[in-house]
Image (cartoon, grey):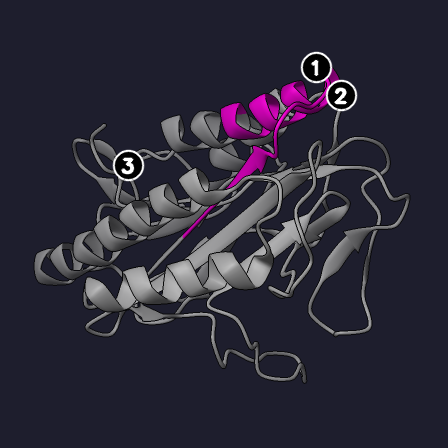
């Protein structure tokens, strides 16, 4: 496994990318309401990134023979887990929407995501969203020098008890590229895997579902949805491993 450690100068550029990401996500979260479309949110993201000197990381991205991704954000609604393409689909009261945002700043990438309810939802759905975000925080807490990747995976999976943990998707390294080594599963055994070192930057991203964790890829060759049609949630932050503990690069002080 080839893991690239970031220099102090590189980390500072990634902080800038992360700051832009956090600011744009705050605008997107505030804009989510019944009647808004994925294209509306995509345009908000594009304009806000450009105003701050950032560029959309996702647009044009391709992998595994997929067509170039057309959006600035990923817009996934209800049973759609990840990689949903922003369209004119109108958000309805009672939906949940996951928005994933990549921002590139001077060649460095930040990657983060959140799930939010559109209006009122049931307690079961609110708990799914809470549990997924808490699983993210548990993983971040384990992202410390001297720990192992398995400690992060175990912390996330332990908080996810009672939910479907999606196989084949998880966190990853990030830096010059959106996806770098290592891959970070959302379940695992403590004390296993690569030992964490200062200078690593990881995008941690738990994905949980109500029901069975099996997924399928829709005809657009990007959107990943739950096979049983149940709801799913997704949270992500970009985190630097430092001697002083995990530093979340994609958050701003509130």
**Does the magenta portion include 133?**
yes
Reply yes or no: does residue 121 show up in magenta.
yes
The answer to which image quadrant residue 30 occupies is top left
In magenta, the rendered stretch is 112-134
Which of the marked residues, 1 or 3, is nearer the chain's N terminus? 1
Looking at the image, the residue that sits furthest to the top is: 123
Q: CA distance from mark 1 to mark 3?
A: 37 Å
| 211 vs 249: above or below | above
Residue 24, percent from left and from top:
33, 51
Per the image, label 3 sits on a secondary structure element best described as: loop
Residue 141 percent coordinates (x, y): 38, 26
Residue under the image location 63 percent in, 36 percent down: 187
Gap in angstroms between the C-alphas marked 1 and 2: 15 Å
88 in relation to 145, above or below = below
Indicate which disc residue 145 carries.
3
Name the disc covering residue 123, or none.
1
């Amino acid at each position: 496994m080839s893991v690239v450690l970031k220099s102090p100068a590189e980390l500072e550029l990634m902080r800038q990318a992360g700051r832009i990401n956090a600011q744009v996500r705050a605008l997107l979260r505030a804009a989510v309401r019944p009647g808004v479309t994925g294209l509306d949110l995509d345009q908000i993201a594009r304009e806000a990134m450009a105003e701050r000197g950032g560029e959309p990381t996702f647009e044009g991205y391709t992998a595994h023979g997929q067509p170039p991704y057309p959006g600035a954000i990923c817009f996934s609604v209800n049973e759609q887990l990840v990689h949903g393409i922003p369209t004119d689909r109108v958000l309805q009261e009672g939906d949940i929407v996951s928005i994933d945002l990549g921002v590139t700043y001077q060649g460095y990438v930040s990657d983060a995501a959140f799930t939010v309810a559109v209006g009122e939802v049931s307690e079961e759905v609110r708990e799914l969203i809470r549990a997924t975000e808490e699983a993210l925080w548990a993983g971040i807490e384990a992202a410390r020098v001297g720990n192992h990747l398995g400690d992060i995976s175990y912390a996330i999976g332990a908080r996810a008890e009672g939910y479907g943990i999606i196989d084949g998707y998880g966190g990853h390294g990030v830096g010059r590229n959106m996806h770098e080594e290592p891959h970070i599963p959302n379940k695992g055994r403590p004390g296993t895997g690569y030992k964490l070192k200062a200078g690593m930057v990881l995008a941690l991203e738990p994905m949980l579902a109500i029901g069975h964790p099996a997924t399928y890829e829709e005809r657009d060759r990007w959107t990943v949805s739950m096979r049983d049609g149940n709801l799913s949630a997704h949270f992500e932050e970009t985190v630097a491993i430092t001697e002083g503990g995990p530093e979340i690069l994609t958050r701003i002080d509130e």
